[in-house]
Image: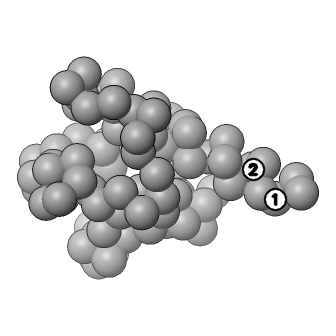
Amino acid sequence: MEKAQDRITLTNQVIETIFNSLNLKHIDATTVTDTTPITAGGLNLDSVDILEIIVQLEHKFGLKMSDSEAYAQHFQNIGTVVDFVKSKT
């Protein structure tokens, strides 16, 4: 039960970080779930937006992401971002 709650908390923190760093006021954050795509068909973010998210996630969670990591696989949807953050903390 605690792990599920930890996942929910981390998901909410990731969503909040994305929305705050990119000022996504035109999207209702309550409709965003683990399966919401980061790019087309979801949040419609581009590569510059994703770089901003990476910087904010590094700052918020104290992460260090290497330049060689394959970010495309980690930034497919909210769930993959959460998994990536969890793997780095």
Question: Few, some or many C-alpha atoms within 10 Å of disc 1 (few <14, some 14-19, many ≥20)?
Answer: few
Q: Quadrant of residue 55?
A: top left
Q: Which mark is residue 6?
A: 2
Report which residue position mark 1 lands on: 3
> In the rendered image of this protein, does residue 73 appear above or below residue 14?
below
> In the rendered image of this protein, does residue 70 appear above or below residue 55?
below
Examine the rendering and report whether any part of residue 85 can be seen.
yes
Residue type (three-letter) at the residue carrying disc 1: Lys
Residue 74 screen position, x and y as percent: 37, 70
Q: Which mark is residue 14?
A: none
Residue 10 screen position, x and y as percent: 62, 46
Residue type (three-letter) at the residue carrying disc 2: Asp
Q: Quadrant of residue 89?
A: bottom right
What count of labels does the image hold?
2
* Residue 15 appears left or right of 24: right
What residue do we see at 54% from left, 66% from top?
Answer: 83
What residue do we see at 77% from left, 57% from top?
Answer: 4
Examine the rendering and report whether any part of residue 75 can be seen.
no
| Image quadrant in which the N terminus is located | bottom right
> In the rendered image of this protein, does residue 7 appear above or below residue 76?
above
Question: Given contact means CB atoms under 8 Å apart, are the residues at marks 1 and 2 in contact?
Answer: yes
Does dot 1 land on a helix, a strand or a loop? helix
